[in-house]
Amino acid sequence: MSWTFLRDLLSGVNKYSTGIGRIWLAVTFIFRLLVYMVAAEHVWKDEQKEFECNVRQPGCENVCFDDFFPISQVRFWALQLIVVSTPSLLVVLHVACREGREKRHRKKLYVSPGTMDGGLWYTYLISLIVKTGFEIGFLVLFYKLYGGFSVPYFMKCDLKPCPNTVDCFVSKPTEKTIFILFLVITSCLCIVLNFTELSFLVLKCFIKCCLQKYSKTLKSSVCECHNLRYVKYGEMGAPPLLQNHHLDSAMSTAQGGETKVLCGTQEA
Amino acid sequence: MDWGTLHTFIGGVNKHSTSIGKVWITVIFIFRVMILVVAAQEVWGDEQADFVCNTLQPGCKNVCYDHYFPVSHIRLWALQLIFVSTPALLVAMHVAYYKHEAARRFRRGEKRSEFKDLEDIKRQKVRIEGSLWWTYSSSIFFRIIFEAAFMYVFYFLYNGYHLPWVLKCGIEPCPNLVDCFISRPTEKTVFTIFMISASVICMLLNVAELCYLLLKVCFRRSKRAQTQRTPPNHALKESKQNEMNELISESGQNAITGFPS
């Protein structure tokens, strides 16, 4: 069980994502997961061994290290990656549920279990909101835990059993700061992508609803027009259906495009 | 999750690349990624543990190491390889979008004559023309920019590509100017020069590929312009007219010579 397990799980999400969702997956895999695995992990490898305090008192270094780094930044990064990737699995679960239902009922219930409509659209939306919430939450927590996004090269510590205020030196502070900034930037990029995808989905649904309403009102107005003509030609005394037919064909040849459109919509 | 995943991502682009692009991918994975994983990480493995300063002052070693090596060489190379490989994803995304659109049109019933089935669309090698040409050229351009940028950052951070065996450091809390010794400086210099050379070769390959694409487009445009200027029907008409003119002039001459003067 390793990162490949998460990678394989998430690759399954790729099938049911929008275009922006796929970009989010690519950014997460390459700029966060891959960078963590091949570079960041090694920077923090010897963090406690190389953490040095200007004192020979046994236990002082341990206590000070524990106070400054309650959880190692690199472990926090790994936790963030796992937690932020899991809401996408809700979508995979929902699709699997749909497929299970189709198998149970032994008939086609959906156009395709992976099409984003109905309940799956809501699941996708919720997974996006939860993902974004986790990203923002982790960034805020990181800031509060470490007092910012930079690692100082030395810190002052006066916890027992340290005899007085001692200077403690962190290993590789500049390199750690660079990777933390990299993590923050990619996090912010993922947040922006999530917001964009959210807006895109909501806007698409809104436009579809408006178009449906518009086509409904257009259909009803065409029906009214047809009824009016029906009444008008009825006044002339001839059997309305027959007269309608003659006059319709006469009008379609005489008036060309406009009438054809009306007839066309009627026929549709 | 490791470099193999990146290889899977980039390998997919290989099918739609030019020959120079395929050579570039090979150079990247054999001469840079493999060397980084197999050799460089071993050489730099004990870089901080074996960085020794001529003082017992706690914290002096940490501070001096951090000052002279703000980012480790191997981390910088790893980031460079990731950034340089990512523009190829633009091409992969464009090809995926193109195939998705082709499949959609095929399902609607258009372009049935071009493809046998959906599998044929998936297996098809997409030609580098039209909008894909722009995407491919932009990806090569960004690759060149990233390579050059990282090489400059490397030169700027370490004052060249050579590692000295002793460094002088006088930063707090070091009590005075102390000597600090790097572990394996010659071996590190050899690998640094190797990686920089591989970088330069990759950059030259990218420049050659860009020139090749530009020449291809210019050649295609001039060929199209030529066929437009002398279309085949017109050429045929001209030659037929010439033949007729010749026949008329020949018969005319015969008539003149045959006429009794």
Image (spheres, coloured by chain):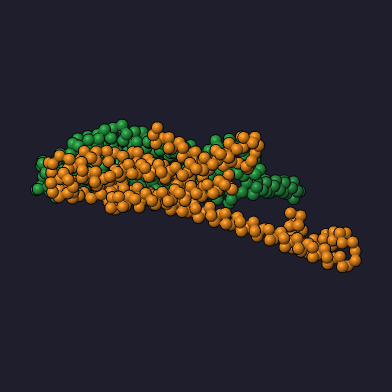
Chain colours: A orange, B green
The front one of A234 and A58 is A58
Residue B177 horizontal/vertical position (percent): 10, 47
Residue at 64% in and 36% down: A105
Residue A158 horizontal/vertical position (percent): 17, 49
The front one of A50 and A238 is A50
Residue at 28% in and 45% down: A70
Q: Which corner quadrant holds the C terminus of chain A?
A: bottom right
Residue at 49% in and 52% down: A197
Residue A108 horizontal/vertical position (percent): 65, 39
The front one of B75 and B235 is B75
Q: Relative to A236, is B51 on the left or the right?
A: left
Q: Which corner quadrant holds the N terminus of chain A?
A: top left
Is residue A230 visible in this depiction of the protein? yes
Q: Which residue is the extreme one toward the left?
A: B176
Q: Relative to B73, is A137 on the left or the right?
A: right
Residue B109 horizontal/vertical position (percent): 66, 43
Total numbered labels placed on residues in the image:
0
Is residue B179 visible in this depiction of the protein? no
Residue at 62% in and 42% down: A110
Determine the image quadrant of residue A260.
Answer: bottom right
